[in-house]
Image (spheres, grey):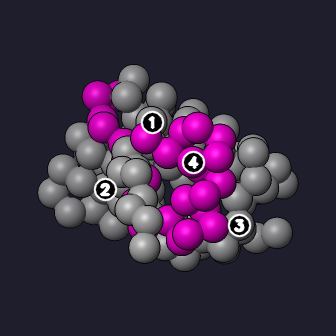
């Protein structure tokens, strides 16, 4: 599986968009990108944009919690944004959606 990223900085908010698929084979790369963003930008708000993420496994979920903890230890609030429905379901099923800043999804 492959993952790439895109980083943007807008004032005190930095965004890391994860693109593709995250699993145990590439989760370390994704966490490195996120940590480097926190370390080099000095942002006070970190957003992890999952709008272009097609797959995440349990290693990826664990990585998002590690990223949140890393951001918090560097005085940055972190939130996950724009997860596709399947990704949101995985995060909710794992019980971490609210801890990652996601609001409960309203039923259609």
Instruction: Please give the range of residues in magenta.
Output: 74-98
**Residue found at x 47% / y 31%:** 70
- Asked if one can make out residue 51 in the rendered structure from this viewpoint, the answer is yes
Magenta stretch contains residue 97: yes
Give the labeled residue for mark 2. Answer: 14
**Is the residue marked by circle 2 packed among few (<14), some (14-19), or many (20+) residues within 10 Å?**
many
Image-based side of 75 in relation to 66, left or right: left
**Residue found at x 75% / y 44%:** 59
Vertical position of residue 49 compared to residue 100: above or below = below
Please, which residue is most extreme toward the left here? Answer: 11
Give the labeled residue for mark 4. Answer: 92
Quadrant housing residue 45:
top left
Image-based side of 94 in relation to 102, left or right: right
Q: Secondary structure at mark 2?
A: strand
Measured as percent of width and height from the top left, residue 83 is found at 50, 65
Give the labeled residue for mark 1. Answer: 99
Q: Secondary structure at mark 1?
A: helix
Front in this rendered view, residue 69 or 42? 69
Give the labeled residue for mark 3. Answer: 55
- Asked if one can make out residue 40 in the rendered structure from this viewpoint, the answer is no
Vertical position of residue 75 compared to residue 33: above or below = above
**Is the residue marked by circle 4 packed among few (<14), some (14-19), or many (20+) residues within 10 Å?**
some
**Residue found at x 65% / y 41%:** 94
**Residue found at x 31% / y 56%:** 14
Measured as percent of width and height from the top left, residue 26 is found at 76, 56
Quadrant in the picture for the N terminus: bottom right
């Amino acid at each position: 599986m492959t993952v790439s990223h895109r980083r943007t900085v807008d004032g005190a908010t930095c965004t890391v968009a994860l693109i593709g698929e995250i699993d145990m084979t590439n989760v370390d790369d994704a966490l490195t990108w996120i940590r480097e963003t926190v370390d080099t930008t000095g942002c006070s708000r970190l957003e992890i944009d999952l709008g272009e993420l097609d797959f995440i496994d349990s290693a990826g979920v664990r990585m998002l919690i590690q990223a949140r903890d890393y951001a918090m230890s560097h005085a940055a609030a972190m939130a996950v944004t724009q997860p596709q429905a399947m990704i949101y379901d995985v995060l909710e099923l794992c019980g971490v959606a609210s801890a990652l800043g996601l609001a409960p999804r309203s039923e259609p």
